[in-house]
Amino acid sequence: MRLVAEQLTVNFGGLLAIADVDIDIGPGEIVGLIGANGAGKSTLVNVLSGFQKTRTGSVKLGDSVLLGLSPDRIARAGVVRTFQSVRLFSGISVRDNIAAAAAVLGSGSESVDTLLELLDLADRPDSDAGSLPYAHQRRLAIARALALKPKFLLLDEPAAGMSPDEIEDLDRTLVELRDRTGMGLLLIEHNINLVMSICERLVVLDGGRVIARGDPDAIKSNTAVKNAYLGTEGGGH
Amino acid sequence: MRAAIPTLVILVVMILAVSLLGVFGSPLLLRVVIGAMINLVVVIGLSIFIGNSGILSFGHASFAAIGAYSAAWFTLPITMKKIFLPSLPAFVLSTQVGLAGGAAIGAVTAAITAAVIGVVIVRLSGIAASIATLAWLAIVHSVFSNAEALTKGTSSLVGLPIETNLFVATFAAILALVVAFLFRFSRYGLMLQASREDEAAALASGIPVRQLRLVAFVISAAVVAIAGVLKGHFLGILAVGQFYLEFTFLSLAMLVLGGMRSLSGAVVGTFAVAGIAEILRILSSGFEIFGLEVVAMPGLREIGLAIMMLLILLVRPMGITNGRELTLPWKRKTANELPITNDRTG
């Protein structure tokens, strides 16, 4: 079952956020979505996850239509996102953050414990989520998303604010997860070096349009990408 | 849920202890205790919706009114009904049920009403939802004030059998507590609390936020309705004004003061406010200390309560319980409570 979006266009009062964007992810694939700030990456994720309505284009998971469904139904259908701004359930415990999402599927506490272990959060499951250090918060957001057993996971800048070591750990975890569950991953990043190592395919957005797509080597040597993006300090901030 | 059992036990013991004050106290204290138990049912009912969803409701007094009046239509002695409310439907006029039957009728009527109006309210979030609940209260108050044939309008409906005693009120409070406890610590309660913390993240986690809010709204309306029924059958008299702004703000004050995020907060807040209000009421009628006579100070109760609330909320903005559940001291978590804030938004 593939996640296929075609001809997506979102318009904020005359300003095109994304225009005619196609994206296609297969099971077990890790696809990187890159572009500078304001290129339309988050808008695309918002459309795929149902937070942004649009009337043009289509989003399908296998044969079922996702575009037009509410965010919670899309998440239950197996397309789960995280947020750039983390958005934990701050006032409840680390364990309950995961348990609340697991409860949607009726999963028991073993699956919560497994996720706590997997994302290295088992040392203080009873702390309020909001009291965790930043990198832990990011990992908790991923654990919470995984509790829904996603077929496709859309990660919006999961490594923002992490140290290089933490990023390496995260990359390893993501690849391991993919290998184990066979889920597809869409990794949104503006730091291009980060995605080069683990993505099989990249899609590059600029000004709301796809300017290039292909494997990391092809993207590195692509002139349009160089002009739009790589030229500007590797995109890192 | 099992980990929270000590909380339930502590709260039940607390309710029983207050109830004992009524057993061994003066007739006046008995009335105060019964009144506090009825308030507790209201506040626990409120907390089922407010505590879990995080949406403040100003409209629940309407469900107390709906419960109280719909029950009274059936519990009033038949002879009295024919005199006071002659235009009730014939089958109502010819039926009389006891307090338990009345409570069931009141709870079901309020629940059905809440299910209808709730569909509108749960579509809204935050302050917009709260204002919608206030508008709903105004509608119900206005309708009940003018529905002469059903409520006697602005005059009072008298003659309700006085059946709410200490046992009944305490039983109702414990029942409400158990219902609230089961909901709060169920997976539905947890999912709704997640939406209270962050609605967008809850939706992204597949949580059907609106549906869960509606469920909580209906359950809480039914519980508050039972309190309305008890109140009518405690005083023997119903007036539409009993279920309006004073009712609303007193019950909200109890909840907020105790800590609206926890069930313990509902119990602690109700008893704290009820107790202090009673002490202030006694003091306000004047007293003598070391031979000095303090004259009566009408209004001391209201002013004193307001000042106390200001002070408590200044020191503990999350309420007396700080939004936590009471639990056994050795079970209290040792994890650090100091939040390291990382507000990186993008």
Image: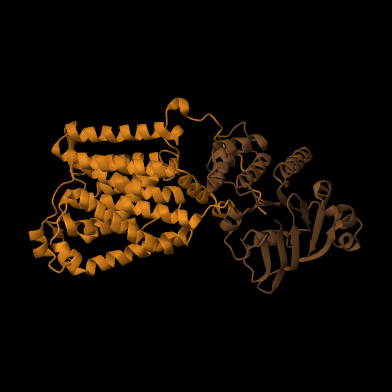
Chain colours: A brown, B orange
Picture coordinates of residue B94, whole percent (x, y):
12, 61
Closest to the observer, B211 or A37: B211
Q: Is residue B65 above or below residue A117?
A: below
Q: Is residue B298 left or right of residue A198?
A: left
Closest to the observer, A37 or A117: A117
Q: Quadrant of the N terminus of chain B?
A: top left
Q: Is residue A218 left or right of residue A96?
A: right
Picture coordinates of residue A142, whole percent (x, y):
66, 45
Picture coordinates of residue B282, whole percent (x, y):
20, 41
Q: Is residue B215 left or right of residue B279?
A: right
Furthest residue in direction top, as rendered: B330
Q: Is residue A57 left or right of residue B278?
A: right
Closest to the observer, A80 or B311: A80
Can residue B278 be seen here? The reply is: no
Q: Quadrant of the C terminus of chain B?
A: bottom right
Can residue A226 be seen here? The reply is: yes
State the count of labels: 0
Furthest residue in direction bottom, as rendered: A14
Give the residue displayed 32% in from the left and 67% down from the top: B139
Picture coordinates of residue B304, whole percent (x, y):
30, 45
